[in-house]
Image (cartoon, rainbow, N blue to C red):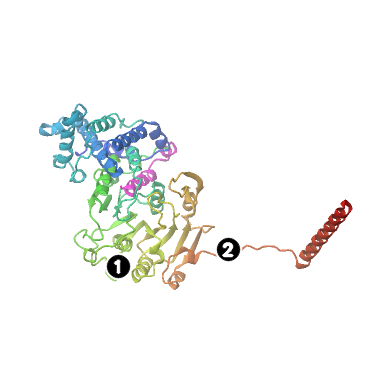
Amino acid sequence: MPAPIKSPASPTPPRAATLAATAAPNTGATANFFSSGLRQKVDQLMDILWAGGVNNPMDSIEQCSYLLFLRLLTEKDETLARLDKKYTRIFAGAWARYAWGHFVTLTGDNLFNAVRDAVEKLHELPGLTDTGKLLFSRATLKIYDRPTLRAVIQGIHEMDLAAHDGVDFKGDMYEYLLSKLAASGTNGQFRTPRHIIDLIVTLVDPQPGGRICDPACGTAGFLISALQHILRRHTKPADAARGRFDGSLLKPAQWKFLEDQAFTGFDNDANMVKIAILNLYLHQLERAHIEHFNPVTTGFGGVYPGKTFQYILANPPFSGKVQDESILADLNHKLDTRATELLFLKWFIDHLDHGGRAGVIVPNGVLFGSTNAATRLRELLLTECDLQAVLSLPSGVFKPYAGVATAALIFQKSTPTRSVWFYDLTADGFSLDDKRTPIAANDLPDVLAKWPGREEGPNSYRVPIEKIQANDWSLAAGRYKPVTTETVSHDAPADILGEVLKLEAEITQRGNALLAQLKRKK
């Protein structure tokens, strides 16, 4: 990832304009993506890989990621060479044989050997950023069938990845590719639905100039959504009305901060880290700080808590126990727990700046667990932070990955909590079975409408902190949900008795008539 060229005469850096075109969605972006042919190309690639023996979706996505990066890096190298005569090309000399155009002309063993060498050695490429080197760290080629490899190379080569009318579909294409992950990962990891990510990001409302962190970033969905949110909020109204969210109101210094310092992500899964790096790269965030480690077991910043952030957005692992000797001592102080969901929530609290905001997903057990660690952590959350909202998510929101019951917590590290706004989401616009097909029922617009004033309604209510404290700091929504009674109007007993006697008389009369009729027939 070579350094970009910037023009000091331009009020908005050229790379920032590219970042806006790539990262900011517009009203027609989804429709344009589906009509662009890229979806069909992705489907064809996955079918080719499946038939060619690469049956694990994660492996298929990993292999496509390597090849996509090689093509895009080659094209960027060629573009910069055309724009700047002094630019030193990456794919020159001994490295020229790893340029994308070289692979397109090869077949058989020659193709396999060339691609394998490129994938395994690209981390040594001069000029590659640290994140680029991490992407290709310990990389191997897993497409062993030569005709399959050639078909995949040709399929990626034929993709139209250029921007059209200022809209770049590379990010949409990769997001669609990631949707092919049809099984949960290890340690409770699974993809968070994009509309749930966008909801949480909107409620947290990250601003330019703030450091944003996802310490369990997975495919980097929260970080990309945060960028898109910032661009939407800082676009001229006239452009926004046309569905173009380019962040044109951002200042050059704010653009530079977004590109170089704003985004940080960690994950303990090496494959997820590589996917996150390419996802961010395709959204023009190649300088995002992504690292491969588990933050609850690895020291960050030298001392605990080390670096802090203005915004934390996350859906951390829900299951599993960390080994005692691996847990950071300061993190686990007074908690004495090995549960990952509790350790991560403590990490969130500790690593927020004063005034910093967080939006995180937790399993429901965190809300009402009776262990000393869970109770102590809830007390800490409510006394050191302003817990502004507990959103109970539908139980099928993570299907087909998992059916675990979850909630989203929105909080700010500042003054203690005075009251908590609860909202019980019963529908999110999709069916709650494994198919997750679109449906009309959707509570998300109501959440957003009620959020500014924390309004109460059929699904929402506010609970004072005194009541929560009296219930052992429990955040179980069912404990506080108002009981509604419906007045039912009944007839007077005398009227009911009169109706009964009337019916009885009618029955007797009809019975007597029937008996008389039978006697006449005899």
Mark number, residue 418: none
Q: Does the magenta-highlighted stretch encompass residue 235?
A: yes
Q: Amino acid at mark 1?
A: Thr
Magenta: main secondary structure equals helix
The residue wearing badge 1 is: 337
Q: Nearer the viewer, residue 384 or 53?
A: 53
Q: Is residue 399 visible?
A: yes
Q: Position of residue 309 (x, y in %)?
A: 29, 56
Query: Is residue 381 shown in magenta?
Result: no
Q: In this rendering, would 406 be left or right of 480?
A: left
- Residue 227, given in percent of the width and then of the height, sits at 33, 46
Residue 178: percent from the left, percent from the top? 33, 43
Q: Quadrant of the N terminus?
A: top left
- Part of the protein shown in magenta: 219-242
- Name the outermost residue toward the top: 105
Please tell me the numbered disc located at residue 484. 2
Q: Secondary structure at mark 1?
A: loop
